[in-house]
Image (cartoon, rainbow, N blue to C red):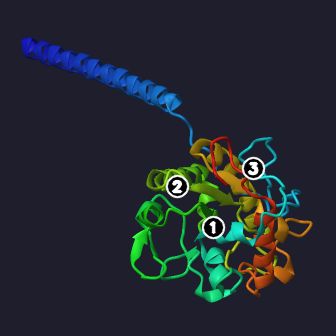
Amino acid sequence: MDAMNQWEKNEVRFFRVMTALALSLMGVCLVATLIVGITSRASETPPEPDVQPSETEEFANPTNGEPTDATDRLLGETADMGEGYIDRMIFVGESTTAHLRSRGVLRDGQATEQVWSDSSGTMTLDLNVLQKTINYPGTGRPMTIAAAVEVAKPQYLVLSFGVNGIVGFSRNEALYERAYGKLIDAIHAASPDTVVMLQTVYPVATNQTAFSEGATIINGYVRRRNEQLLDIAQAHDAYVVNTASVLCDSAGNLKAEYQTGDGIHLTAEAYRRILQYLRTHGYEGKEGDAT
C-alpha cells in the first residue's frame, strides 16, 4: 500500500512539473508574439490623417490659388494675341469646357469643332482617363483624347479638369497629379509639337448645392489643386494659365453674375472673360518654337 502511495505521489509530482513547464513555455511564446507584433507595428508607416478643413476655415487667396512660383511654366501677361490665337486652340475638359460650344462664344458658335467632349458633355479626370473617349468633331466617332490629338495635331490643347472628383482629390492629392500626368504624356507622345495648357480649376459660387460641403470648403480644395498645377506642368512639359482668376470675388468664390443659377456652370459672359484672359496671357514660345 505504501509503495502504491509513493508511486501515486511521484506521478502527481511529475504531472505538476510537466504542467508548470508547459505553462512556462506558453508564457514565453506569448511574450515573443507580443514583442514581434509591437516591433512590426512600430516599423509600419502610419497612415496620413484625413484632415478636412473646418467650415470656418479662411481661404484668403482672392485669385483662387494662382500659382506664385516664379517659373516660365506660368503664362504671364502679354500683348493681346488676337482671336486668331484662340482659333488655333482645342479645348478638352469637364462640362464647364463643353459649354464653350453651347454658349456660342468661339468663332463658329455652336457649330465649333474646337471643343472636344464625350457624349455626356463632361468628363472626370481619373486614372482611367486614357481609356475615356470624346466624339471626334465632324464624324462623331468615339476616340481617346490621345488618338484624336494624333489625328488633329492641334497647335494648342487647353485642358480643364478638377471640379469633377474634387472631394476625392482632397483625400488623395497624388491621384490628381498622376492622372493629369498620364494624360499630358500621352498627348505629347501622340503629337510632340502640341503645346499643352492647363487652366486653373474654376471656383464654385456660394449657392452651389451639388456638393454637400459648402463653397468655402470646395473652393479650398480648388485652391489646393491649383497650387499643384505648376508642379504638374513642370514635370510634364505643360503650361499653366490662371483663367479662374477672372471669375473670383474677393473671397475666392465664383462671382454670382458668372454662374447660371446652380453655382457651378458658367454664363456666356464668363467664357468671354476667360477667352480674353487666354488672349492676354499667351504662349509666346520658347527657343526653337514657332508660335
Left/right of residue 97 with respect to residue 133 in the rendered view: right
Q: Position of residue 120 (x, y in %)?
A: 51, 82
Q: Who comes first in sequence, dot 3 or dot 2?
A: 3
The numbered disc on residue 179 is 2
Of tags 2 and 1, which is closer to the observer?
1
Q: Nearer the viewer, residue 203 or 19?
A: 203
User: How many labels were placed on the picture?
Assistant: 3
Of tags 1 and 3, which is closer to the observer?
1
Q: Who comes first in sequence, dot 1 or dot 3?
A: 3
The type of residue carrying mark 1 is Met
* Disc 1, SS: strand
Q: Which residue is mark 3?
A: 74
The type of residue carrying mark 3 is Leu
Q: Nearer the viewer, residue 242 or 164?
A: 242
Q: Which residue is mark 1?
A: 89
Q: Nearer the viewer, residue 200 or 40?
A: 200
Picture quadrant where residue 252 is located: bottom right
Left/right of residue 264 with respect to residue 237 in the rendered view: right
